[in-house]
Amino acid sequence: MEKILEVQNLQTSFFTESGEVRAVDGISFDLYKGKTVGIVGESGCGKSVTSLSIMRLIPSPPGKIVGGKILYAGKNLLDLSIGQMRKIRGNEISMIFQEPMTSLNPVFTIGNQLMEAILLHQDLSKSGARDKAVEMLKLVGIPSPEKRIQDYPHQLSGGMRQRVMIAMALSCNPQILVADEPTTALDVTIQAQILELLRELQEKVGMAIMLITHDLGVVAETAHEVVVMYAGKVVERATAEEIFKNPKHPYTQGLLNSIPVLSKDPTGKIKKTRLEPIPGIVPNLFDLPKGCRFQERCKYVEDRCRGVEPELRELVPGHWVRCVKAEAGDSAMAVTVSRG
Amino acid sequence: MSTQNRLVKKLLKKPIALFCLVVLAAYVVVAGIVFFTGFGSEWANPLAAAHLPPTFGSGYRLWFGTDVMGRSILLKLVQGVYVSINVGFGTAILSAPIGIILGLLAGYFGGWLDEVISWLMTTLSSIPGILLLIAISYALGKGLFAVYVALTSTSWIGLARILRGEVLKHRRMEYLIAAEAIGASHSSRLFRHILPNVFHQVVLSLSFMVEMGIRSEVLLSYLGLGVQNLPSWGKMIDDAKGELHNGVWWQLTAATVAMFFLLVSLNVFGDYLRDALDPKARY
Amino acid sequence: MWTFLLKRILGSIPVVFGVAAIVFCLFNLVGGDPALLLVGKHATPERIASIRAELGLDQPLPKQFVQYLGQIVTFDFGRSYTTREDIRKKILDGLVPSISLTIPAFFLTTFFSLLIAMIVSFYRGRAIDRLSVAFFVFLMSMPGLAYILFGQYFLAARLGWAPISGYTAEWPDAIQYLKLPVLIYIFLNLGSDIRFYRNSLIEEVNQDYVRTARAKGTSEITIFLKHILKNAMIPVITYVVLEIPYLVLGSLLLESFFSIPGIGGMTVDAVANSDFPVLKAMTTVISLLYVFSTILMDVLYRIVDPRMSFK
């Protein structure tokens, strides 16, 4: 497996009137060619900020990347000038966003917007760019692309707009695609189509995908590796299989327990299991508790958790957890996940 | 409501906003003093020689000099403060409820009520402001009453339009449908759900209305309409018109400066207000 | 598009009617007897009666209204009471002087305000933005009259840069007479125009499509000049179109002070003289012009914004 991106101890803060908020506080993970990393967590855990940081799209002011490294192609992206970064954006590393409705410029045709990226990064003539744009639309499965290319965004449905976004992002054959909640704003059926499309394209093209989502179902479908974030920190990191079979962090377990599951018991009757939501809400980043950030919602919390913040440790090869109890191999924390 | 408390707190943190508020308060206090104690009611009496430049040491009344009839410009100015504050705030306070009620009604009930109110708004705003003011002053004569009618009859429109738009926007929103689902009644829906959301539009419009009121009043009294029995700043500027070429600058300057500080404070405060009310949490 | 236009014109008839009704009420109904206003209370009854007959005020009200509507349709508003000139002629004569002031002034103001607004919003939040916002707030807070009076005094009387007043229709001499009023016009309107344009531009700056453009590697300048500007133009165009009636009206104050024989000055004189027919005519004409420009604006808006269709 070829490593294509290495995020090392990334730290991003926002400097507000009420002080500095560290939205991303020391995140590390790697992306591999042809593989998908799913970054999961609740709203506000810092996953979007992470993706924007990689693209260096953090609005500044008030935001700023204050620490860490993002290694790509032998360089630290954070050391590049903005001009150099622009050459990479849309070209080697592309990004798609959550709201396809508003992410496209309403007063330009989709053809124009597709061609923009192509003309920016590739040495094609206008008509060559146009042909490539049509080709991309075909690639993402938009019917009659030669006609569609003159359409305006409002003439397309949500799912089609997101396909256009994907087409735009892939038009220059990027090595990495950063997808920030690409399906959250879409219907479930369209969601499945888009995820399928991403999977197909990944196989075809061999790009790495960084998929941000709060939806574990999406992660299960598409990710090879999963990074679970909470309050700006990584709390667990493992392959998708491991995460689902063997979640070690109480938060991850809680997330899995929150998913309603339909299953039948041995007699064939539908099992009615109680939904177990995680009590409480995410902590205020201005007012973090001392010690483990998850302590106020954790059902296994004890005094050890309130003192020093636990480290992220590799408990099993390839499986990292930030929890003292998990480390201790506490049997009380054996997986009580009701998976069908 | 906590929105108001939060708003006040946010504003109090900014020294510039605070300063403007103090300036505005000063004007209002002066207006109040004039109104309640009749301070400066002797403004019409000639005090000294005509066109006396600002003189210090002979009493405060001569600090800004005298006009063509030897009257104290300071006293005239203070009367002008009263007129401007009176008209500015008075018309805004009257217009606001009209705008709120008509805007909300039009947006909420739609149908023919909306048609009628919209027609009224379009028709009134088709007549350019200054011409309508002139027309109404023509019809109602000079004086404070005419000014009030003239200004109030048009300044409600902006707010009504905005609120109508807000209601139409909110009508479709989820939380109202949810409220309907739990059986909330017509009026409780309207007042409880929509009103807090439009609170900030009203506050913003108020500062704009006050400004428009002051400016229009000055223009009207300059043209010889509006308030004529009291020296308003517009009247002072009209009086001062011919003076400048003779090197007599103090009446014009006094009125200009007085208006300037009032409007700047109003404007700046209004801007801070807008920023403080912005629901998109800006850093 | 034409059906839309037709529908729109038809739809504005109630508004036109409403305007006529309001103007009529104010002038013929509510106000004191116009005849009295014109000649004063001490005139003889015969005088008053003859004026009333002349102005058509001796007719029953409904008939007066119909007469008025007729005046609108034929664009014949009778004669000015004070100068006895035919009002229609006066309006047409005054048109050229008025627009020779307002149109160049408007173009210059719009040009500079757009330019400044673009620069300022490109650097939003930075020192140049804040300073200029403050500066223009200051600029806007001075009463317009002060600009005119001080401008006339300093630039004309003292420095002799321009004549104090006057007008000629001859080019290029006209420039001498127009340059000061045009300059003052710019000062009067720069602040509020910049505020509006800046707000329109900044509205766009926070939009999601801007972020997408950035993610594609587009430069900030391209984002501003291509993506943002085109979106912001939509409200700007509507704003500009609605200025048209005011351009025709001319600047009341400027024409009055600089003795420019335009429509605005005519109106100011009419106010001073309580010239009933003229005031009524002016109000009517400019209001109708306004209704027309809202229709124009609606059409333009739909042409410019691809999201809007002609229903």
Image (cartoon, rainbow, N blue to C red):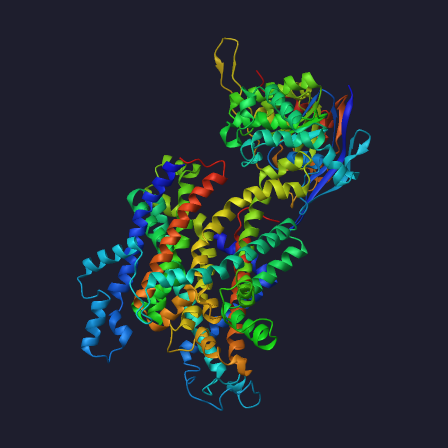
A158 left or right, relative to C291:
right
Q: Where in the figure is residue A102, as x and y percent of width and height?
A: 55, 35
The mark tally for this picture is 0
Q: Where in the figure is residue C151, as x and y percent of width and height?
A: 56, 71
Instruction: Check the image and report above or below for C57 versus B195.
Output: below
Residue A167 visible, this orientation: yes
A324 left or right, relative to B170:
right
Residue drawn at x 41%, y 85% as measured from the top left: B44
From the image, which quarter does the C terminus of chain A lie in?
top right
From the image, which quarter does the N terminus of chain A lie in?
top right
Asked which quadrant contains residue B219, the reply is bottom left
Q: In the current view of this chain or complex, which residue is farthest to the top?
A: A267
> Considering depth in this image, is A38 or B169 the residue closer to the camera?
B169
> Considering depth in this image, is A220 or C207 the residue closer to the camera?
C207
A25 left or right, relative to B212:
right
A188 left or right, relative to B129:
right
> Considering depth in this image, is A111 or C169 the residue closer to the camera?
C169
Residue drawn at x 43%, y 84% as measured from the top left: B43
Q: In the current view of this chain or complex, which residue is farthest to the front?
A: C170
Residue drawn at x 23%, y 71% as measured from the top left: C51
Residue B14 visible, this orientation: no
> Considering depth in this image, is A277 or A87 the residue closer to the camera?
A87
Q: In the current view of this chain or complex, which residue is farthest to the right?
A: A74
Q: In the current view of this chain or complex, which residue is farthest to the left?
A: C60
Asked which quadrant contains residue A49, the reply is top right
Instruction: Check the image and report above or below for B265 versus B47.
Output: above
Q: Where in the figure is residue C10, as x and y percent of width and height?
A: 32, 43
Instruction: Check the image and report above or below for C299 versus A51.
Output: below
Instruction: Check the image and report above or below for C310 versus A315.
Output: below
Q: Where in the figure is residue C289, as x and y percent of width and height?
A: 38, 53
